[in-house]
Image (spheres, rainbow, N blue to C red):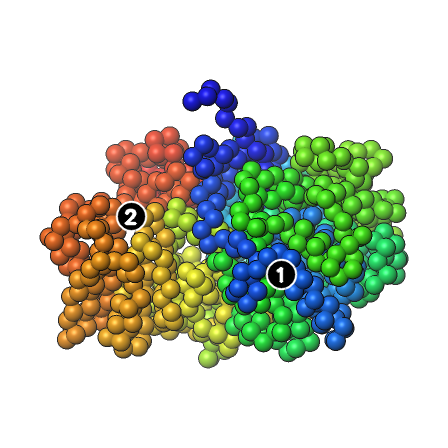
Amino acid sequence: MDGSAPPAAVRTTCPYCGVGCGVLASSRADGTVAIAGDPAHPANFGRLCSKGAALGETLSIRGRVLHPEIGGRRVGWSEALDAVAEGFARTIREYGPDSVAFYVSGQLLTEDYYVANKLIKGFLGTANIDTNSRLCMASSVAGHRRAFGSDTVPGNYQDLDLADLVVLVGSNLAWCHPVLFQRIVAARRSRPDMKVVVIDPRRTTTAEEADFHLALRPGSDAALFNGLLAYLHRAGARNVAFLDRHTVGEGPALTAAAATGSITAVAEACDLPAGDIEAFYQLFSARERAVTVYSQGVNQSSSGTDKVNAIINCHLFTGRIGRPGMGPFSVTGQPNAMGGREVGALANQLAAHMDFSPADLDRVRRFWRAPNLATRPGFKAVDLFRAVGDGRIKAVWIMATNPVVSLPESDSVRAALEACPLVVVSDGSRANETSRYADILLPSLLWSERDGSVTNSERRVSRQRPFRPAPGEARADWWILSQVAARLGFGDAFAYRNAAQIFREHAALSAFENRGERDFDLGGVATLDDGAYARLEPTSWPVRANDRKPVERLFGNGRFFTADGRAALVAVVARSPAHAPDPVFPLVLNTGRVRDQWHTMTRTAIPRLMEHTPEPFVAVHPEDAALLDVAEGDLAHVDSRWGRAALRVRLSPAQRRGEIFVPMHWSWPLAAASAANRTVNPATDPLSGQPELKHTPVRLSRFRAAWQGTILSRMPLELGSLGYSAAIPANDHWTYEIAGEDSLTEVWQHLVSQIGEGSEDRMDVQDSALGRYRSAWFRTGRVEACLFMDSQGELPPRRLLAGFFSSRELSLADRCSLLAGRAAGPVRDEGPMICVCHGVSRKQIDAAIAGGDATVEVLGRNLKAGTNCGSCIPELRQLLLVAKPCEVA
């Protein structure tokens, strides 16, 4: 050893949800990276969730896109960039600028986002650019703009510490934003009088921690909050001074709210007990310091904008906005959804929160010196891919996102890309299914290599800093875009040297001719030199040039960003979802996230994060399951008018009767037949364009498989098309759960021909009469793969089989035990992983409870379970309740 000190940790920002947690990344001598929360970052103060804590395990270059490709052929950057520029130029020349489009992502950094938006809107002359953030928060944007005149989140995370009432609407905060949820839990621990209400059709982990839970009918949020507004009016909760001085539209809003009817009528519309609704209304009325946190359950709706405004109306009516501990609060799903909003990556906005008004068009045109500036909004996400499908868009560039999985009616997106003359994809991962449709594939940087900024849900700009070198020929997205722009003849406007230069231009545009009329203003940091940008601390906007002091909370002065400075109460008419259940499709499908996974799993499909929920599933109420003849662990089909998914049944009394839940993460390559969005209806909100991902009429039926099987393999496999398949990574092998309706013998023969490459010998056991086939492959005495298929679904325990893969050499007796499905020695089945952060299994927790651990706190001290992100705490509490009901109760 040379005695030199280890390299200092790099301060960066987590690439997952919109909480925007600070991360300390320390590179080790062996090439691995240690990850810790940044205690100095105001978003998380050192806390990380299970996904953030596991970031160091996601950094393998296996499966990375390392070189540019055209038609699957490796090429140099010059050839690839020429092909992109020539393709877009040719398309525009022949069909006009509206024949091209970009589809971008909340995974991009603000600097990447800015260059993409500037190129297509300012110089290609079309506004056909939209972002996958359209799928998660576009209704909030539209609702904010209707109410405030701007897309402004009024408060910050400190309000969660100060509130006397936190209302969580359509948000499983404990799983989707765990660090924020634990902040609420900590605040309630210090102030026991603080109350938490959860409004969600499912009894989620978040609801388990609430004071009470309103399991309303899906889609009825506007009726509930219209009823609250009417109740507040009747209860005399009107803030006279605030409404008279700072708002308009009170009369129409109250008239619309009154049309909702009495509490009894609201109860009928929401399918809730009238007493529960009245209790919630009384609580909201009595507690001035109230924060309403809402997320995808509100936004992802064909009436999402109205739901947002129904919530905002209640805060405006009581003047509960702009002051500590109160206000409506939209939490976003992606790390830089807010950054995309800032730069105008939504098709209906210009950069810097400007729109397509004549004054804003003139301002942006002059700042960019862009005579070809687009003058009208472009296609929003769902309509954009419809336009690709019908040929109106003939060239599309997709960056850092996976629309063939994430968009509704996703099979139509696949068909659209297959038919499109030119598809360019910029991404770092081959696990992105969309890259399979690329004519030109460009290797982008991923999180650990990127340099730039992101903005979180509380309007706080933080730096993402690189701590690993770029692999292969991967490049920053802003660099790729700038190189294409130069080839199109726009080099002077895109002559960027680094991310700092782009940030300065972005910040300068936000302050350009902005005398306080626009909310978004980074003028105070627009002149940072490269060194100051490198050191930039987390900073909230607006931060104006004249005082350089960030504004942490907006609207405290009652001044809004409308022409007259007044906020608008918007008359909201509660509407039903776009598609209602019927006798053919009698159930309602809700889609969402699970605790340890992220989007389409291109990053999070690692062994530790797969432990808690290894397979795609459909959650069904036990009474519905009995009527449908499905049981726990069965396979089932979920069918809608738009598609089909095959999933494992999980019985859950947390579901409302008549409703099912499917996580949105699984698709190719992990579970090709289980993509939830194949079934989701394509209805969208008429104002926001956000799709209705929470309410699709479906039917559920038992998947009557002719056979089921299990494969364990040291090498990942391409299994082809099967009725059901789920790939589950482990540290030294992959497990594949499979099932199908085709001939067992033929499928077995096909799989045998695909498995065991490089193996020296194979052993088989076949019993065609019983419909049972077993095979194992070996090399130098070590098992390389094994395959078990059975017409009755009688298969050995997967954990038993996994034990054979830890042995360096198997004897003949061991091999026979493997094929017989018997353990060669003692097998320890730890059960599912409950606390992923600290690797604590169900078996360990059960043993600790049996040994006397009687509280969550004691389990935390002894096992560390629940002491990091805390999202497993409700599960720990449930295990305690089952084991020691009297003590826990």
**Residue 788, percent across and down?**
23, 63
**Residue 628, percent across and down?**
35, 72
Q: Quadrant of the C terminus?
A: top left
Residue at the spot of label 2:
831
Question: Distance between the Cα atoms at labels 1 and 2?
Answer: 49 Å
Badge 2 element: loop
Left or right: where 764 falls relative to 380: left
Q: Report the amino acid beneath label 1.
A: Ala
Q: Nearer the viewer, residue 678 or 683?
A: 678
Left or right: where 540 falls relative to 585: right
**Residue 90, percent across and down?**
72, 71
Q: Choose top left, top right, bottom left or bottom right for residue 144.
A: bottom right
Residue at the spot of label 1:
80
**Residue at left 77%, top 64%?**
124
**Residue at left 52%, top 55%?**
65
- Work out whether 424 lies above or below 734: below
**Residue at left 53%, top 28%?**
7
Q: Report the amino acid beneath label 2.
A: Gly
Left or right: where 148 falls relative to 29: right
Tag 1: Cα neighbours inside 10 Å, few (<14), some, or many (≥20)? many
Badge 1 element: helix
Q: Nearer the viewer, residue 333 or 129?
A: 129
**Residue at left 17%, top 55%?**
818
Tag 2: Cα neighbours inside 10 Å, few (<14), some, or many (≥20)? some
**Residue 141, percent across and down?**
70, 56
Q: Quadrant of the N terminus?
A: top left
